[in-house]
């Protein structure tokens, strides 16, 4: 007996699919798949739900279930579009909400319906838009960050000037540069915009300056609009701190109208354990595109992180480029201790729509930052 | 040689401490601790930084390093308050930003300086404030959620009425209730407020109704103010989707002035692997208190999740109650398939400042929801 009535429901439209890897033997893995169908939807005793609308339409459905190499099983589960309310936070609740607290389940890939995809604008610029801004047709991009934390706004701007003078394509603030007393946000942004503009005027090229915007939520839009007014060419946001949907909100905003680079700080725990969490492809690719990022920063498989495998980096590139309805493909921006020795391997891994994010080894090379950037640019142009 | 000047810096104030567990033998574990000092601060080649301000003040410092049972090593690392800018997102960058992408590192506990703690208001109500609102002095609270997804706003409100009539202390919306066509946000909130008020008028008791607010960022404050106007007694927020700092911003807002319950959806990956991520104590306790939550929802060690151990739940209770300067202690709100059989054990684990979050087994017991709540309340009053 149940207090849940059996009523028709307005959820008979299309369904989307999510692909999960499930640990354990067949019985355990199947139980996990069945659990996802319930825990991510009604989160209620299934036996109390009578035949009818909720059981038919709201429950998740196992579409396929099959062995998956030595890593357990792979299940494709479908959900009604309507239960997401066509809103990103609730979509993420359905994809990986409560089950994020259960072991042995990894979200591998999204296969969203065209109606769900159509409810997201995706990246405003994407690969082609960013290439237009830069006037760079086909080669990989060179990107860097101003650092270290502790420099003054004047020193950071001087560094940006030298880097831009060498022909750097993209300069961003280090993600740790917030609003510290030694380099206050407003001064840092203004001075760096000015420095990069001065260098661009000298070189006749276009270095884009992307401002890292972190801060208390009360100040986020104010800081973003300040940066826009000051003349930045784009923004860096950290969805680990703001939530993915804030990035989408910024990317969607016509009054902001700037490219967005996504930084992965605070989110590594989603991907590091292969038995659970969310795949690299989803975290650093598909979800970011839904949330409007134009560039996805993450650690390259060779470098000082060495925690992502080559295959996982290939998967990220796929997540950044695979067809997703009208959602544009985006640049991968691998970094974390890369050097010219790995340029070739990275091209194999990521293809040409990649921004090589370099700073530590660039600074190790020489105190002549401009000269080093010039040399790296030449190497890139020969790739 | 370095381009980094050796200058005095305005970061000579107090420092805060973070405690990490590091996997590996002594050499590996110490290298991880040293890596944290650099990666979470300058993120730059240490050898290029000359003697002086940045090296002395901005670098993290290993304060203690010792063996930690069979689980590797335990390091206490201190950081200058000033590098956080006294802002929560940048504090989280320092605590667990880039190193979230490196294996073998787990953030165990925060030991913040009094000046850093003083820059956060913390929970607006906390345990004592919430007890005042409820007029309940000493016993554990009974809490529940309206569900399943798929019910109409009218049906959800009817369910809330029956639950409130039995003397439920807190009723929240299920975290999956967003703004779906079958139960639109505004209608759901209005009808549930009305239903709970009607029940309160009949019982003479005070059931608090906490509205789950999820949605596109453009609508979040509008939805929150609507809920406030409609007469909700509190809010449930999901920092996994909004970021922790949005919760802090809502809790801090005098024009909102409502208790906040935090739901853990989408964040389980931080805690599930004991070798990495963030401890249960930090994720479900300390960070939530910095972010202003008054109640912390998470899965009880006995129940349908069974992914958190009893000790991990004890740790969460400690994180919700341990001294943190002026930051108030908060209620634990364990749920996920609990039943009256575990009331006693839960009292041992959590103490009396706990909200028992029950729905599945409450509904399994009988279709007479009011009667079941009455009986559970009696059980609680005898504890």
Image (tube, coloured by chain):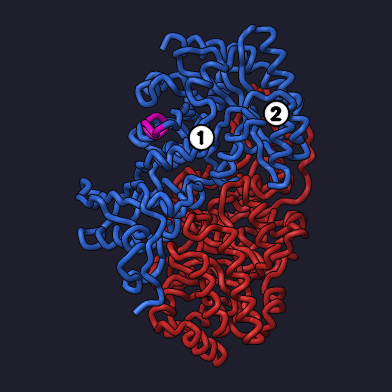
Chain colours: A blue, B red
Q: Which mark is residue A121?
A: 1
Total numbered circles? 2
Horizontally, is A166 left or right of A104 in the view? right
Label 2 sits on residue? A228
Q: Is residue B276 visible?
A: no
Residue A323 in the magenta stretch? The answer is: yes
* Magenta span of residues: A318-325
* Whether residue A295 is situated above or below residue B203 in the rendered picture: above
Q: Residues within 10 Å of mark 2 (few under 14, many from 20)?
A: some
In which quarter of the view is residue A233 placed? Answer: top right
Question: x and y percent of residue A72 in the render?
Answer: 24, 52
Question: x and y percent of residue B209 in the render?
Answer: 61, 71
What quarter of the picture does the N terminus of chain B occupy?
Answer: top right
State if disc 1 and disc 2 touch (CB < 8 Å): no
For the point 38% across and 42% down, which residue is it?
A112
For the point 62% across and 79% down, which residue is it?
B198
Horizontally, is B342 left or right of B356 in the view? left
Kindly state the secondary structure of the residue where label 2 is placed.
helix
Horizontally, is A296 left or right of B120 in the view? left
Please identify the residue farthest to the front as the structure is shown.
A8
């Amino acid at each position: 007996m149940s207090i849940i009535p059996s009523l028709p429901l307005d959820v008979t439209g299309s369904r989307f699919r999510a692909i999960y890897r499930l640990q354990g033997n067949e019985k355990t893995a199947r139980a996990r798949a069945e659990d996802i169908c319930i825990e991510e939807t009604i989160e209620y005793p299934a036996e109390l739900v009578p035949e009818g609308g909720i059981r038919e339409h709201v429950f998740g459905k196992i579409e396929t279930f099959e062995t998956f190499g030595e890593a357990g099983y792979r299940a494709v589960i479908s959900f009604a579009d309507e239960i997401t309310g066509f809103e990103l936070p609730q979509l993420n609740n359905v994809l990986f909400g409560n089950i994020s607290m259960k072991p042995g389940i990894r979200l591998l890939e999204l296969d969203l319906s065209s109606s769900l995809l159509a409810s997201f604008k995706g990246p405003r610029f994407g690969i082609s838009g960013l290439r237009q801004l830069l006037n760079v047709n086909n080669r990989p991009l060179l990107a860097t960050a101003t650092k270290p934390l502790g420099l003054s706004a004047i020193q950071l701007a001087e560094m940006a000037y030298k880097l831009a003078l060498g022909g750097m394509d993209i300069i961003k603030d280090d993600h740790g540069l917030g609003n510290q007393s030694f380099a206050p946000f407003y001064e840092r942004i203004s001075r760096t915009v000015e420095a990069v503009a001065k260098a661009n005027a000298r070189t006749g090229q276009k270095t884009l300056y992307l401002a890292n915007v972190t801060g208390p939520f009360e100040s986020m839009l104010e800081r973003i609009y300040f940066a826009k007014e000051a003349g930045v060419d784009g923004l860096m946001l950290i969805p680990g701190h703001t939530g993915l949907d804030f990035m989408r909100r910024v990317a969607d905003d016509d009054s902001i109208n700037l490219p967005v680079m996504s930084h992965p700080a605070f989110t590594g725990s989603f991907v590091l354990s292969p038995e659970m969490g969310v795949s690299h492809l989803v975290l650093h690719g598909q979800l970011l595109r839904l949330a409007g990022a134009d560039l996805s920063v993450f650690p390259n498989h060779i470098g000082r992180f060495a925690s992502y495998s080559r295959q996982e980096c290939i998967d990220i590139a796929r997540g950044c480029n695979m067809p997703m309805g009208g959602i544009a493909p985006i640049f991968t921006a691998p970094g974390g201790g890369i050097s010219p020795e790995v340029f070739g391997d990275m091209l194999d891994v990521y293809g040409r729509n990649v921004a090589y994010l370099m700073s530590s080894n660039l600074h190790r090379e020489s105190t002549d930052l401009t000269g080093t950037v010039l040399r790296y640019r030449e190497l890139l142009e020969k790739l």
